[in-house]
Amino acid sequence: MLGIIIYLAVTLTAFMLGAQALRTLRLSPDDPAERGLAALVFGHALLGLGILALGLLGYLRWWAPAHLLLLSALAGLRSLDECLSAAARLVVTAGRALIRSPYRLAFIALALIIVLQLLAALAPAAPSDWDATSEHLAEAKQYARDGRVHPLWYDHHSQFPATLQMFYALAHVFGVPGAAKLFHWGFGLMALGAVALIGRKLLAPAAGAYGALVLATTPVFSRLMGVGYVDLPPIACGILAVHFFARWLRDDQAQCLWLSALMAGAGAGFKMQGLALLGVLIAGVVIARRARFEGLRLAAISAGIALAACAPWYVKTWVLTGNPVYPFAYDLFGGRYWSAENAAQYRYSQRAFGHGELPPYRHFRTLPPLQRAFAGPRQPVNMLLAPIYVTLEPTAYTDALTPLGVFATDSIGPLWLALLPLLALFRRPPPVRWMLWILLALGLWWVWSMQYARYLMATLALVAPAAGWVVVEAERSTELLRVVVRWALALWTAVAIALMALYVAPQVPAALGLVDTHTYLSGSPLYEMSEFINETAPPDAKIALYGEPRGYYLDRDYLWADPGHSGLIRYQEISEADDLVAEWRRLGVTHVVINALVFPDIHRSDDPLARMIGQAQHEGLITQLATPPAARVYAVFRIAER
């Protein structure tokens, strides 16, 4: 309950701050729904920058963020009545939609999905929430423990734009980590609201309802609402950016263009992926204006507004690493604790997703440049058929371990491939045409850069209103098409909700407080290993993790020690076990943890690093500790005194 209170208080503060800032900038939309969503997005972006400033100054203690929230609330106090009125209108509108709307079945399904994912968001982060427990929540917990935002050099992801991580850090600073995932859930709610808005305003009254339902029943989207990732804020920002861009094209109001740029810039501050949409929209401004000078002028102003919203994150990274988009573009900018070899391996790992096998890394590096560029998933036929493959063969486009898990939680589902081709049957209105051009541009970028299903979601969500419009047009079309589309939507909605219920059900006791976090996570080898270290290692211990980046449950300092994550450990200077132990000691490492399921066997492997660790144990430089039975898949070592 305390987590919900903190989430609501911070969200209220963000709304008031954002509404006042938009009013001050004379960018406040007249429509209440547009104004509310824009205020929420912009307010969170501003608050995130404020928390970042406190963290960089070393004031990430409870009293400093509390004062920041208080001052922000006072600054936006004039908008309190508007916020309360908006909340009341939302409740009334939702009630009417569920009871009286002709599309109430769609709204009932949406409400059920939202509640299911709220329960998942209230449950503690599970080890299966990989990116949350290795990066997003883990980074936030480290910042909160240290009382400051500082480079985590072992994790290159910590240099990415991280607006949402600031709110995760806020939850941990206040000692209520259960509030953290609610912020991600909230942005999922905003994304659904933005789809409903753009569909209703620009296409047809029912297009918003059906479009939101298509998005909500997309497995990868719905699961994201219940985990502590960072993918949903740029999706919400992107949908709003496209909405205001389409409004500008229709009404020729400069305010809409500036709002589009502001939303796109805010999205790029939540996640670097938002830069792609920002670039497409800036190009769209130039294309949409036949007068070249006028188009360039508007594009330059839009770019300036967008960069003002996200530049602090990239400037911070540039100052700390020498590269504003670290660790990307290494050939152009370089980057601290990174190398050309790290960059090459990183690109290779990203390109491995998709239909088609890449050659082994050593062989891949020897291929001619053109052959290397179009290898594996980038073969022309694979890129052309990627929409079919990602729908029917989702395991190749994600990290999930089982086919059922992929289909239920990490796939895009069948509706996109079923509905979007039907656009060819109808006369498409201008907003739909622009959405399709944006889909084409970002889709090409996706197949060329990294064919990962979760990253595709940020592009597909932009055309969710168009998918809803297809359902509306099918209802008006032939009887056969109407029946097929209606039953396809209904059946998939039932299947999607059933799959959600299957993986949310085990989380319900913890979400409702019927069991505590320890009971809920007990039995997990990762959690048991972490608790063992928390109980036995001294407070100043530092843990080197091999084959296991999920350090969220550790209450001690740690680092990712595997080669490839960073250049923090100078493996190029290590040839013997003594050298490796000396390097650990240089970094303050006192304990070493090995995930035996992933890392090579230190006694029988041909891997040089594994052999050195085994040699260090043989020579008495490290001593293995006895772990609880549930944690036996991990080997925990203590480094001997000098």
Image: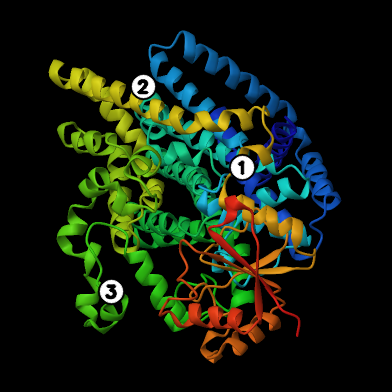
Residue 512 versus residue 127 in the image, above or below: above
Residue 98 image position (x, y, % from top left)? 48, 13
Mark before the other along the chain sequence, 1 or 2: 2
Label 1 SS: helix
- Tally the numbered discs: 3
Distance from label 2 to label 3 (Cα)? 50 Å
Q: Relative to residue 114, is residue 102 depicted above or below?
A: above
- Residue 398 on image: x %, y %: 36, 52
Question: To which residue does mark 3 refer?
Answer: 360
- What residue lies at 74% left-to-right and 42% top-to-bottom? 176
Q: Which mark is residue 521?
A: 1
Say which amino acid is labelled 3: Pro
> Could you tell me which residue is drawn at 60 percent across and 52 percent down?
629
Colour pattern? rainbow
Give the mark toward the camera: 1 or 2.
Answer: 1
Mark 1: give few (<14), some (14-19) or many (20+) Cα within 10 Å.
some
Q: Decide which of tag 2 and tag 3 comes sooner along the chain.
A: 2
Residue 310 visible in the snapshot = yes
Q: Which residue is mark 2?
A: 206
Residue type indicated by callout 1: Leu
Among numbered discs 3 and 1, the one appearing first in the sequence: 3
| Left/right of residue 28 with respect to residue 246 in the rendered view | right
The numbered dot on residue 81 is none
299, 180: nearer the viewer: 180
Q: Is residue 546 left or right of residue 421?
A: right
